[in-house]
Image (cartoon, helix red, strand yellow):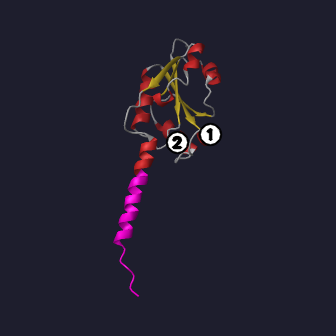
Amino acid sequence: MFKDKTIVFTSGTFDLFHYNHLRMINYARALGDILIVGVSTDELVQSYKAKPAIPFQERLAIIEALRTPDLVIPQHTLEHTEIVKKLNIDAFVVGDDWFGKYDYLKDLGVEVFYFPYGMGTSTTNIKKNIHDLYEVTLEQQRQEKPSMLK
C-alpha cells in the first residue's frame, strides 16, 4: 500500500475497445484507490497473437481518455514481477481467458483477480462479425452488378 491506498493494476491489448474491456477496467477501479492500466504494445501483442487492428498509440489514447484510470502506461511484457515491485501493486486484474497465468504474483503479496468475460463481446468476435458481414456485402454487390453486354 502507498500511504494507506490500495493500488490496482490491470492490463490488456484493448483492441477494438468494447463493453467487456470497460467492465473489466471499472471492476478493477472498484477494487482500490489508485488504478493503473497497462496497454500492450503492438510488439508485445504480436509475440502471442495477431497484430491489433488499432495501433498502439491510438489504443493508449483511448484508455487515457477514460475517467477511471489514474495512470495509463505501456506494457512491454507479460511478466509482471518488475512492475508489481516498482509500482507497489496490491491487486492485479486480468481477463479470465488468462486464468492461472498470473498466480505467481500471489507469492509477491498481490491479490489476483481473473475477471469473468463470459460469453458475448470480445475483440475476436467483433473481428469475425465484421469479416462475415463484409463477405455478405461483397456477395450482394457481385449479384447486383448488371451483366455486361457485348
- Magenta stretch: includes residue 54: no
Specify the quadrant of the image occupied by residue 125.
Answer: top left
Please tell me which residue lies in front, 42 or 66: 42
Q: Which residue lies at the image location 40% right of the left edge and 49% below the top edge?
A: 129
Residue 16 in the image: state x and y as whole percent. 46, 44
Specify the quadrant of the image occupied by residue 150.
Answer: bottom left
Q: Which residue lies at the image location 43% right of the left edge and 29% below the top edge?
A: 24
Q: Amino acid at mark 1?
A: Ser
Residue 127 in the image: state x and y as whole percent. 45, 48
**Which residue position is annotated with label 2?**
59
Which quarter of the figure is the N terminus placed in? top right
Q: Which residue lies at the image location 44% right of the left edge and 20% below the top edge?
A: 31
Contact between labelled residues 2 and 1, with CB atoms less than 8 Å apart: no
Residue 132 in the image: state x and y as whole percent. 40, 53
Please tell me which residue lies in front, 60 or 117: 117
Q: Residues within 10 Å of mark 2 (few under 14, many from 20)?
A: many
Q: Amino acid at mark 2?
A: Arg
Position of 115 relative to 62 (above/below): above
Position of 149 relative to 40 (above/below): below
Residue 26 in the image: state x and y as whole percent. 42, 28
Q: Which residue lies at the image location 46% right of the left edge and 43% below the top edge?
A: 124
Position of 133 relative to 150 (above/below): above
Secondary structure category for the residue under label 1: loop
**Which residue position is annotated with label 1?**
47
- Which stretch appears magenta? 130-150
Comes first in the chain, label 1 or label 2: 1
Secondary structure category for the residue under label 2: helix
Viewer-side label of 1, 2: 1
